């Protein structure tokens, strides 16, 4: 849960913010409107030839050791598609060229005692032929799971769990 105390000082002038109103903090001096918006992210369900979905094990906190879909946050001036391609290359050492939109979902991401919201665009794709997966970056391992045996209780983020469930319920 995003807490008002996580945002104490105006990035414009350093003064304190007035109390949070809906999703905006207003500076008590310069009146800067600082909106608390979700951070854009991406994820992808990569399917192998057996129609199993690839999950990665998180190497670091938050949620170290739990399952996640490959993907991550967008860099500045990067499209969702560019970031997805970059994240998969960084995390698994492969290049994906063709992927399709599945849905989007909101999630909470807490790290270092600060909580933020993310809005994640979920895609799906086929594992490229002859791909050699090499866990790297913030991924320690990977596993494929049958669509009938997804370990939802081991998944790191609630919004992602629901997005995968919704997709598989409607397309399986």
Image: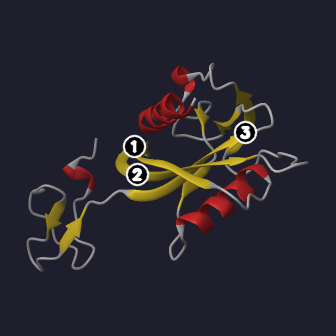
- The local secondary structure at tag 3 comes to strand
Q: Which of these two is toward me, 169 or 140?
A: 169
Mark sitting earlier along the chain (3/1) = 1
Q: Is residue 13 left or right of residue 147?
A: left
**Label 3 belongs to which residue?**
140
- Measure the alpha-carbon separation of dots 3 and 1: 22 Å
Residue 28 drawn at (x, y percent): 8, 71
Query: Would you name the residue on which mark 2 appears?
Result: 118
Residue 118 in the figure: left or right of residue 44: left
C-alpha gap between disc 2 and disc 1: 5 Å
- Image point 35% across, 56% down: which residue? 38
Residue on which disc 1 sits? 107
In the rendered image, the vertical position of residue 166 relative to residue 137, given as above or below:
above
Could you tell me which secondary element the residue under label 1 belongs to? Answer: strand
Q: Is residue 5 above or below residue 165?
A: below
Residue at disc 2, secondary structure: strand
- Front residue of 63/72: it is 72
């Amino acid at each position: 849960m995003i807490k008002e105390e996580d945002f104490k000082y105006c990035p414009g002038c350093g003064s304190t913010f007035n109390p949070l109103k809906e999703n905006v903090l207003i500076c008590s001096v310069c009146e800067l409107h600082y909106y608390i918006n979700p951070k854009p992210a991406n994820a992808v369900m990569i399917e192998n030839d057996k129609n199993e979905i690839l999950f990665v094990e998180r190497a670091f906190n938050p949620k170290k050791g739990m399952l996640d879909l490959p993907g991550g946050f967008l860099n500045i001036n990067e499209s969702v598609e560019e970031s997805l391609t970059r994240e998969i290359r960084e995390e698994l050492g492969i290049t994906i060229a063709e992927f399709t939109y599945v849905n989007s979902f909101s999630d909470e991401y807490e790290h270092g005692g600060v909580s933020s919201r993310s809005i994640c665009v979920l895609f799906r794709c086929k594992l490229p032929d002859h791909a050699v997966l090499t866990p790297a970056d913030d991924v320690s391992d990977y596993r494929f799971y049958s669509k009938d045996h997804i370990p939802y209780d081991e998944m790191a983020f609630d919004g992602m769990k629901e997005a995968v469930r919704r997709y598989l319920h409607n397309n399986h």
